[in-house]
Amino acid sequence: DLLAPWRRAGAGAALISVLGRGVNVALILGMTWLGARAFGLGIPASAMATYLPIILLVSALPVNIAGLGPATAVWVLAFERWVPGERVVAFQFLWQLAFGLGVVVRGLPFVRKVIAEIDEGRAGAAARRSERR
């Protein structure tokens, strides 16, 4: 049941989660637009707000070769009416690098807990295997 975690957490927690995700998307959108402006790309904010969600969706697809693929094509197709394609690709490369670094930095505080949970899972699995024997 996909909604089970939401039911357990309650309506307040679900609302906070949705609002938090909305703020996250708004920050990504705003910072990407500001980054494009700083990079010298004259992309309107409305165009960024329209196409960036599509870019993020396509970027989640596991189809690419050396990091180039559908996401790069969508960046170029979406924004080349305002900026030449090669400048869009240059910005997209820097955006992908900055976005990836941001994900790593945001996740670093949780690495120890994740490793501890993995170790607990392995220990539990080993204990279950030894009980079966």
Image (spheres, rainbow, N blue to C red):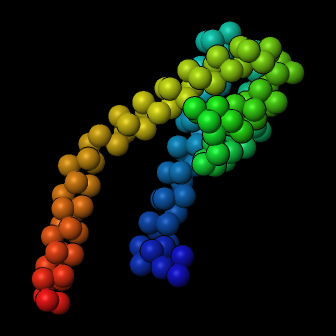
Coordinates of residue 31 in the picture (x, y in percent)? 57, 27
Q: Tell me the quarter of the image containing the C terminus.
A: bottom left
Residue toward you, 69 or 24: 69
Residue toward you, 105 or 123: 123
Residue toward you, 37 or 105: 105
Image quadrant in which you'd find residue 71: top right
| Residue 36 in view (yes/no) | no
Coordinates of residue 113 in the picture (x, y in percent)? 22, 54
Q: Say above or below: 80 vs 104.
A: above
Which residue lies at the image location 18% right of the left edge and 58% below the top edge?
116
Left or right: 47 as drawn, with respect to 115: right
Q: Say above or below: 67 vs 113.
A: above
Coordinates of residue 42 in the picture (x, y in percent)? 76, 15
Residue toward you, 125 or 115: 125
Query: Residue lying furthest front in this view?
Result: 133
Left or right: 84 as drawn, with respect to 21: right
Image quadrant in which you'd find residue 25: top right
Which residue lies at the image location 45% right of the left edge and 74% below the top edge?
5
Q: Say above or below: 115 vs 51.
A: below
Query: Residue lying furthest top in this view?
Result: 40
| Residue 66 in view (yes/no) | yes
Query: Residue lying furthest bottom in this view?
Result: 132
Coordinates of residue 103 in the picture (x, y in percent)? 43, 38
Which residue lies at the image location 38% right of the left edge and 37% below the top edge?
104
Which residue lies at the image location 48% right of the left edge and 79% below the top edge?
4
